[in-house]
Amino acid sequence: MAIPIEWYLVLSAFLFVIGAAGVLMRRNLFIVLFSIELMMNAVNINLVGFSRLHENLIGQNFVLFTMTVAAAEAAIGLAIVTALYRNRRTLMVDMFDVMKG
Amino acid sequence: MVEKILFIVFAAFAVAGALGVITRSNIVHGLILLVFTFINVAGIFLLTQAHFLAVIQVLVYAGAILVLFAFVVMFLNLREFQQEEQFHRGQKWAVIVLAPIMLAEIIFVVTAVTWASVNDGFSPEAIAAQGGNVKVLGEQLFTKMLLPFEVASLILLVGMVGAILLAAKEDRESVCLREWDDDDGVTPSLVEREV
């Protein structure tokens, strides 16, 4: 096996932590959505790396389903963004405090 | 050896692009850096002998999803948000301190564990002998993973209906229509009218 599995896991950890940091510290709703996509990509790298380590294809098949969910999530997320922008005229996430969460 | 060097190059570019996404204030720049990251991840998939996934990564992520994002970014006028504060004030410093700690923890665990291979018999050579990555992946998708495949189609349907429902204008309360102003005759004006 050419590339050690740890390399995949470390790269995935980098992307996941960057995505999580983006979700937590950015105010712009778009960047939050981008960061969620980054985190999903990190998971995909893990799945593909383990699929290569274990020499089966279930991991690669599962990535297809992750991408399906990511596409649906992006569509619904953007619909929510347009609805929020229409109602509140802002995209800064700390302005959406109707539910006092 | 070449594979390892390429992996490091792709990984470095992907991480740099991801860092750019969460630090740039211009959303369009962030979008382009996100495409850059996704294409580098597709390169990683190629190095892992996941050919079909590399193509799908470019097609679905760097193609469809990013075009969707770009469409909405240009659809809404976002220039006004660039002048605003981009980060949560207190939370930013907590994240800057805690994120490297979380990263160090994950890397420590990942390198401490010894990963044993199950070896299910689908090595790249065996896959090539059976007709290639796409063929073997497709056969598994439509035999072993048939039920998840059907559920995925349901998820896409729900996503489509949900997106239309959320983004559609609520025309029960008010509808925005273009009416001709009678006074000066030619200028069209947008009128919010109760129905």
Image (cartoon, coloured by chain):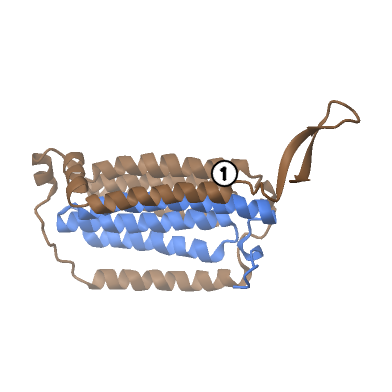
Chain colours: A blue, B brown
Query: SS at mark 1?
Result: helix
Up-down: is B74 above or below A60?
above
What residue occupies the far right of the structure in this picture?
A: B183
Along the line of sight, which residue is nearer the eye, A52 or B164?
B164
Q: Position of residue A42 (x, y in %)?
A: 36, 57
* Residue A11 is at least partly visible in this image: yes
Q: Is residue A75 left or right of residue B10?
A: right
Q: What is the number of callouts on the image? A: 1
Along the line of sight, which residue is nearer the eye, A84 or B133?
A84
Q: Position of residue A48 (x, y in %)?
A: 26, 54
Residue found 49% across the figure and 53% down from its top: A34
What residue occupies the far top of the structure in this picture?
A: B186
Along the line of sight, which residue is nearer the eye, B8 or A66?
A66
Q: Which residue is mark 1?
A: B72
Q: Position of residue A89 (x, y in %)?
A: 69, 53
Along the line of sight, which residue is nearer the eye, B110 or A61?
A61
Up-down: is B189 above or below A17?
above
**Amino acid marked by disc 1:** Val
Q: Position of residue B161 (x, y in %)?
A: 48, 48
Residue found 49% across the figure and 65% down from its top: A21
* Residue B13 is at least partly visible in this image: no
The quadrant in which residue A52 appears is bottom left
Residue found 40% across the figure and 62% down from its top: A16
Q: Residues within 10 Å of mark 1 (few under 14, many from 20)?
A: some
Q: Chain of mark 1?
A: B
